[in-house]
Image: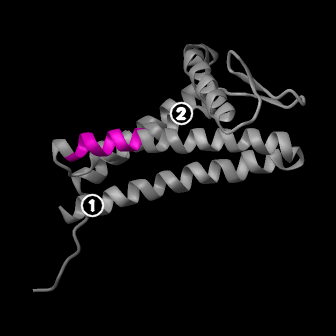
Amino acid sequence: MPYVASARVPATWLRQLLALAAVFCVAIVVDVFPSVIAWLAPLNVVVAQVTSALVNWFGMPVTSEANFLFHPAGFGYEIDAACTGLIPTLVSIVTLACLPLSTKQRILAISLGILFTQSINLLRLVALFYVGVHHLSTFKLTHDWLGQGLIILTTAAFLAFWIRTSRRG
């Protein structure tokens, strides 16, 4: 009897596709609607305060006012909803929640995913502050391409690790 390929999509893929579609819808809503952006303002302030503390810890002077960071030499930037790492964190949570893991592994993976994604994002924000102060001419390139690429690649690598782990167990 000849082999016939199945057109059946695994349930985990379908769940993950639907969940990721929901996350991307949330990302669009967060980006487009001012009322949602205003709702996220406290998160922007918290991320700015943590970034300010880290910049100070690394020995650079910084002043934080709400969700703005300023250097005494005149450089400054605003941390908005896109800078909080919320969307990559949601993508991590959704992807990890859809993997065939035990409850214990799922809780561990999601907890580590949140910690990892937010840590990389904070590192990115601190590095961007440094670049803005010392190499202002490359700030836009660093922010738009290198910073975004860093968060995307590291999140993808983290998720690939857990996807591979889930296939073994």
Amino acid on which disc 2 is placed: Ala
Please, what secondary structure does the residue beneath circle 1 have? helix
On the question of residue 8 being in view, the answer is no
Q: How many marks?
A: 2
The vertical placement of 68 against 164, above or below, is above
Q: Is residue 81 visible?
A: yes
Task: Give the answer, above or below, for where 1 lies relative to 53.
Answer: below
Q: Which residues are magenta?
A: 105-114
79 part of magenta stretch? no
Mark carried by residue 27: 2
Classed neighbour count for the residue bearing mark 2: other residues with Cα under 10 Å, few (<14), some (14–19), many (≥20)? some
The residue located at (45%, 44%) in the rendering is 116
The residue closer to the viewer here, 60 or 14, is 60
Q: Give the residue type at disc 1.
A: Thr
Q: Residue at x 23, y 74 (%)?
A: 5
Kindly identify the residue that appears in the image at 24 percent across and 58 percent down.
166
Quick check: 165 above or below 25? below
For the N terminus, the image quarter is: bottom left
Q: Is residue 45 left or right of residue 2?
A: right
**Considering the image in quadrants, where does the C terminus appear?**
bottom left
For the residue pair 114 and 40, the one nearer the viewer reads as 114
At x 51%, y 41%, the residue is 119
Q: Is residue 62 left or right of residue 88?
A: right
Secondary structure beneath disc 2? Answer: helix
What residue is pinned by disc 1?
A: 165
| Image x and y of residue 105, in percent | 22, 47
Q: CA distance from mark 1 to mark 2?
A: 28 Å
Q: Quadrant of residue 132?
A: top right
The percent position of residue 81, horizontal first and vertical second, equals: 61, 27
